[in-house]
Amino acid sequence: MTNIIPLTVRSHYSLMHGTASVQTICRAARQMGYDRLALTDTDNLYGLWPFLAACRREGLTPIVGAEISAPGTRRRGIGLVENAEGYRNLCRLLTRRHLAPDFRLETDLPPLAEGLTVLTADVDLLERWHAAGVRVVAAMPRRPLSAAHPLRVAAARRGVPVVATPDSFGVHSDDHSQHRLLRAIAHRTTRSRLDDTDTAPADAWLAPPQIYAQRFAPCPQALEATHAVAKRLTFTGPAFGIIMPPWADARGRSAHEALRAAAYRGAARRYGRELPEPVVERLEHELRIVAKMGFCAYFLIVRDIVRHSPRICGRGSGAASLIAYCLQITNVCPLKHNLYFERFLNPGRQDPPDIDVDFAWDERDGVQQAVLAQFSGHAAMVCNHVLFQPRLAVRETAKVYGLTEGEIARVTKRLPWYWRLESPATELLDAVQARPEARALDFPPPWPEILSRAQRLVGTPRHLAVHSGGVVITPEPIDTYVPVERAPKGVPVIQWEKDATEDAGLVKIDLLGNRSLAVIRDAVANLRANGEDFDEERWAPEDDFATQQTVGQGQTMGCFYIESPAMRLLQQKAGVGDFEHLVIHSSIIRPAANDFIQEYLRRLHGAPWDPIHPLLADVLNETFGIMVYQEDVSRAAVALAGFAHAEADRLRKVMSKKDREFDLQDFRTRFFAGARTRRIPADTIRAIWEMMMSFSGYSFCKPHSASYAQVSFQAAYLKVHHPAAFMAAVISNQGGFYSTFAYVSEARRLGLVIRPPDVNRSDERWHGGQAALRVGLMAVKGLSAATRRRLIAARRQAAFEDPADFFERVRPDADEGRALIHSGALDRLAPEANRAALMWSLACWQHRRAPAARQGRLFAPPPERRRPRFPHEDPLTRLRHEFAVLGFLCGRHPMTLYRTMLENGGALAAVELASCLGRRVRFGGWLVTGKVVHTKHGEPMEFLTFEDETGIVETTFFPAVYHRFCHMLDRGRPYLLSGRVEQDWGAVTLTVTQVSALPPLRSLARETAARADRPLRKKQPTARAFGPGTG
Amino acid sequence: MERAIIHLNIADFAVAVERNLDPRLRQRPLIIAPEGAARATVYDMSEEAYQAGVRKGMPLRRARRRCPDARLVPPHPPLYGQVMRALIRQAKPYSPLIEPGEADGHLFVDVTGTSRLFGPPVDVAWRLRRQAAADLDLTPIWAVGPNKLVAKVATRLVKPDGEYVVDAGEERAFLAPRPLVLVPGIEREDLIRLRDFNFSRAGQVAHLRREELQIPFGNRAGYLYDAVRGIDPSPVRALGARPPQIVRHHTFENDAHAPAALEGALYTLVEQAGRTLRNQRLAARRVSVRLGFSDGLVRVRQQGVRPATANDLVLFTRARTALYQAWHRRVRIRHLDLICDRLTYPPAQQALFPADRRARRRRTQLVAAMDAIRDRFGPAAIKVGRTLAA
């Protein structure tokens, strides 16, 4: 008996059809006794690299292929790759399938069929393709056809072989119900109303070979034919080597010559005409290595790309290269900051160099477009495979079960966005119920069923998205390496995500967006618009003493990368704000490195320490014997366990990958073995390995940290010396760590006045003036971009004279008009009137332009009616309206409205906490932001940031307290907290024991509110809650 | 002629009825909501529960968190309908113009011009209250006013207990100091717009002339203008003034989305409505299906029935068409209502072709046979297969 070779197998990369991952399929195939296997997903090669890896792991011989569908019909052909030529053709065919609007399977396939064996179950296609000279094979999916079936008749007539195929969508009979779930999600229907023609037959799963032998007993030759077909399929995956982007010089120089010339030209600009000796030495050294490794062209291409923008930030390990610095790809001098070139490139490594470049977030797309246009046909973006995360899986499954948005949100809003189950065996329902946030929920039917189904969905790819910045440029047309699709936003994307791209050897250049570069750009532009002179060429913010001091006090809200509460607390505790320490701090602050941070602070403040092992003394000397940078992992592996450089580097890379368990075990064994041979005690090895593991998932190399610290310092400098322009830029660019509300409070604490929006003065964006911020029109909720543009254009012609003039020329719709009035933007047009009067003007204008009023109007429109008498405006209502529209108050912090209430309750203000160290206090504050972390025992706890008009208070909710109160904590609301004031290395925090919610602003009763029309007793607005001086 | 409208308002009607049934419920806050259903919402609650923050339509779970010591009782709409009918019966001798709310303890009685017969309206109102107290053990709030609007504001004002009389000509003065939220017919949207102009009380709005109100409020101005002045010309509609229809409701215990469950429930409704039609010797010319989705969205679709019929099998095919027309979303379904209207006497005309005649006769006989069995052995004695799926 001959075993079948499965020639058509689909994985979950056949999006919303297939149910099993390639790993599952390969493992199941081996267990069932197969030794060869094809992966033929529909219209794609998404899973090619995971498939090749899984086959290697399971000891299977892979067959590469894909199913190609004819758009709008059920006709299919399956292309199986015989050789490299066939692979190129398959890529081009799949690209055509996705990009050509007039794609026709029957005519488009034959010209690209060289090197392919094509399977089809369609009689018409079989005959046409056979006639066109395609090597075609008739496929009998799942079950034998009778000898009189047209397909078999046609095959026999033309002498075409007939093969049996599994034509599978899963690997188990259970997978069918999962398949139906996917189809229902794709069709946006419920399972009970799903049409049978939309789903695969119930037996479309990969069965063991015995079952096919039984089924095909009447025609065993169909099983044997799979072997005959497979014999030709010798291709087991592409072997490209490293594929560099091409570079051609207009003057015909070699890349090496061009790079040398460019580097020296750049060096002269950076260091002056007379190059210092170390610079020349270093440049020569780098040029030698780069030339030896053949990366000259790569540097030149990246240089060409960064020329698109004057303000970029080269990051990643590339910042260790002096060449990159000279070519203006990076902005940190590697000599000044001790960045070793070997951390970027060394001859021992085989993998491609990796330079990432940040552009201002709003310029990035333009740069990408320009690159794609310049290398049209040879360039495309890397894609992301968007997988079902628990939240999306639960939501989509619940919809299939007919639950309403409200019911679904009740559960999903209690799930974190990206949440990986501890282990695949954990039941989702148990995991959800174990979360204290879900305590108030229960899960009546059909929730248990939904959650168990959703669990199987987690990790299934949902659709393709564009990777945020990765561009691949190839010397040959890109569709001969990989199939290309077009993303909804119009750019071409390759079918592989970044890991697969790397596995394939395609060099990707990351062009990323960075908001802070835009903040710095806008702040500088704001200064220049105010007539101030700002010389960027000689700008060295890291040497500015005032800036260092501010950074050392953690007063860096709004500053790139160092504004989060965790980072600001670390700065406060460290109490140092120079560049070298900031580089350490932005690297050490990793989720898994808490203990090391404590130890670092101890040593920084003078505690004695010994290197963890003498072999590591050199490696970790500059970081107090603590592993801080990503490359410390590989350097430790080399120094302690005798790893080769390339091997150590692979270990570093594996740690940052998602499904790393498999490879990591292997490295662990080798690390322990290697270290033992050097007679290192077992517990030291274990301690070092643990330290290394704290880098998993997320870590920085030193050059990267230095690049970022440079931007942080620029931001901090602007904040210290030009707070108005800086805060205006921070708020206008949005997307910072905090809400606009929090930034407005910070601006007020910096002593700035917040001037309300004004239709005659406000721009679209916020503007910083003399010690004042003008609110931009973008802050007015509900005001459309079109109306904003109309407003600015109308004002450019002439300032608005009165409300009627404004409405007539800007033509806002009713809600926009109301929002503008409530925001206070029209107040200055009618200084004597209140907002009810403005509402009246709006209503009159709308009334006049209403069609009914215009109809039959023979003469000029009637004048605006005399305004009736409206009741007096209640100041609290006015503030409520303003808050509803803007999300903050211009004139005061909303906590001031609660002050009377709080003082009666014995609560302190933020500035007063620092003088109550160790005491139990009450404090009323506005919840600004927070971060949930897990303790060593896996219990969740949260660090929350509150503020009032006098300062910021960082609080800690330990697990028991978090468990009790987490369900009532919402951002943007006031709370009354009780707890103990604590101090750690000079940073003051509040450890909370009790929380009660204060009434939200919209339901704050007039009687309890402090006088809304009058400012309260003045507390030092610029005073800080803490800082080294107040502890 | 001066009108005199009595508004009877039994505060927390369902609660009052339940407490009458079981006096032990009087000691504690009470929430009326279906138990056991997956996502029950509050049907009604007692004053104590209201004070604790419980509101109608609120998810039961939240309600229980706000008022943890409340007793929970499932609603009994037929019972409330029964009490309501008793209330109407008591009012009937005084006027033909009686307009009840939907089993909610609200009742308008127009007693205009009946003073000579029954005494002044205030006396009638007292009598109605005393009667309700004596016979039904309920104490309605009552108000007498010159129109429905004013009478309703008056009872809202004295809730939970009391009475109020507004004389003709006093409407405006009566309403002037009242918060605008009390005025029926002023919706949430209106209130937001009114607040834009700093209006919070009816009297403030009454300063504006009609043309002035028209500017910000457009079409709504007319209603607002009248309402804040206590002007309401709408008549008290007589009982039975609405065209006859037969309505049957089904509420799924757990919201449904399987076609079999829906069709089964629909068939049961068709059987009930058909039986009522046949008992009354009537036939329907139109069936409508009203679907209430889990999230509160309601959708109605109608199908004409020609010739008019009371036969379950025919009604069902039309109703099923309407069902699938209405069922356009994948959200589960909570309520399913069947409405048969355009009622007429069964057509005497025979079908034209013998085959049709035969089919029709067999359908009629089948339904008649089932009716006979049910008359004798109870409604559950025989069932159609598809209703078992529900």
Image (cartoon, grey):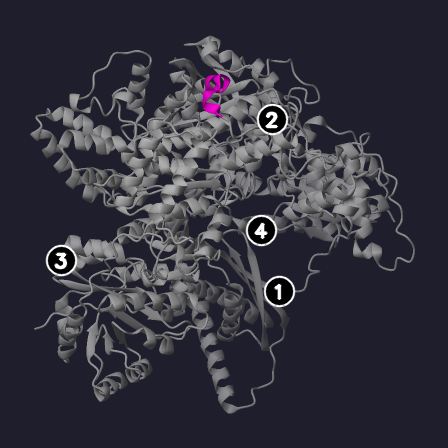
4 vs 2, front mark? 2
Q: Position of residue A174 (x, y in %)?
A: 25, 60
Q: Are marks 1 and 2 on the same chain?
A: no
Which SS does the magenta portion mostly show? helix
Q: Residues within 10 Å of mark 1 (few under 14, many from 20)?
A: some
Q: Earlier in the sequence, mark 3 or mark 2?
A: 3
CA gap between label 1 and label 4 equals 19 Å
Q: Secondary structure at mark 1?
A: loop
Does residue B331 show up?
no
Residue annotated with mark 2: A724
Identified by mark 1, the residue type is Gln
CA gap between label 4 and label 3 equals 70 Å
Please indicate whether residue B337 sits to the left or right of residue A138 in the image. Answer: right
Residue annotated with mark 4: B82
- Magenta-span inclusion, residue B255: no
Q: Are marks 4 and 3 in contact (CB under 8 Å)?
A: no
Residue that extends furthest to the right in the rendered view of this protein? A859
Q: Position of residue A165 (x, y in %)?
A: 22, 71
- Magenta-span inclusion, residue A545: yes
CA gap between label 4 and label 2 equals 71 Å
Pick the residue in front: A672 or A196: A672
Identified by mark 4, the residue type is Gln
Residue annotated with mark 1: B245
Residue at 73% in and 28% down: A874
Identified by mark 3, the residue type is Gln
1 vs 3, front mark? 3
Pick the residue in front: A903 or B207: A903
